[in-house]
Structures are given as C-alpha cells and as structure tokens.
Image (cartoon, helix red, strand yellow):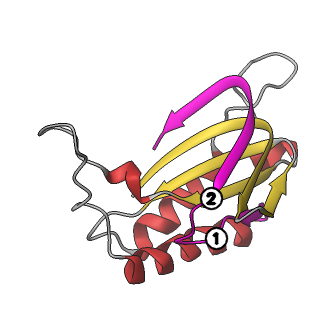
Amino acid sequence: MRLVVTRVMEAAVSSAGEEIARIGPGLLVLLGVARGDTSREAEALASKTAELRIFPDGHKPLDRSVLDVGGEVLVVSQFTLLADTSRGRRPSLSDAAPPEEAEGLYLRFVECLRARGVVARTGRFGASMAVSSVNDGPVTLIL
C-alpha cells in the first residue's frame, strides 16, 4: 500500500461535474493498493495517518496529529501510485491490486480512520475524478 499524505487548508474531489466530497483543514490522502496487501497494512497505515504529527502547535512546526487539531481527511483511491517506470516511458501498473481487491482495502483504511475518531470523506472508487487542494506548508509525506 502506498500513500501520499498532504497537509491541506482545504481539499475537494468531484466526478462528472458533481462534487463528491470536501474537507476543511486536515489531510488529503492519495491511496494506492498493491497486489498482496492485506487488512493488516490498511489498519496499520490508517493508525499511522491518524497519528502523524505534522501539524504545528505553539512551539513546534510538526507536533500535532489530525486528531489533535480536529482536522478532516479526504481519501482518494489512486492506483497509479503503484506505477513502475523503470523500463521505458509507459508506466507498468502490474503491481497495483485488481479493483475488486483494492476497493475492499481502500474502504477498510477509511473505516479504520473513522474508528479512531477521524472525520474521513472519500472520493468515488474507480471513477475519473478531479481533485483540488490548497496545500498547507507545504507538508507532504509518502508512506
């Protein structure tokens, strides 16, 4: 499983001209599921995401979590995060899990965030989407 986690002031996702979800301050998470991933990875990464200390407090620039600051999380499925570009110019996506496996783990990740008390919103799995964000910092991590 591969995640790109960005601290945002706001983020939104739409598909076919319809806004699906919008958040205020918090995290935009682009999530790719790899072949062989299990619920264990989804649960561990959801826990890590909820507890990442990447928000400022009064003294340190990276000391509080999304839970600490009462932020929201927008999770968008993005299988292209598993692309391999080591051979040529056309990305190979053979490392990405098949959609029927990936969707379940994507939903498990979101469910685990919510179980930890995070307000989590989602894109539309498998849809072509437009994602917009106003990055904060910018602070972006790859997990």
Q: Position of residue 9 (x, y in %)?
A: 82, 35
Image side of residue 78 versus residue 118, left or right? left
Q: Is residue 56 visible?
A: yes
Element type where label 1 sits in the image: loop
Hey, which quadrant is residue 5 in on the image?
top right
Quadrant of the image containing the C terminus = top left
Q: Which residue is mark 1?
A: 124
CB contact under 8 Å: marks 1 and 2: yes
Front position among marks 1 and 2: 2
Mark 2 residue crowding within 10 angstroms, few (<14) / some (14–19) / many (20+) = many
N-terminal label among 1 and 2:
1
Magenta-drawn stretch contains 2: no
Give the residue type that dot 1 points to. Arg
Mark 1 residue crowding within 10 angstroms, few (<14) / some (14–19) / many (20+) = some
Residue displayed at 82% across by 44% down: 68
Dominant secondary structure (helix, strand or loop) of the stretch shown in magenta: strand
Q: Which residue is mark 2?
A: 129
- Residue nearest the observer in this picture, 80 or 142: 80
- Residue nearest the observer in this picture, 34 or 54: 34
Q: Disc 1 and disc 2: Cα gap in Å?
A: 8 Å
Image side of residue 116 versus residue 94, left or right? right
Quadrant of the image containing the N terminus = bottom left
Which segment did they paint magenta? 117-143
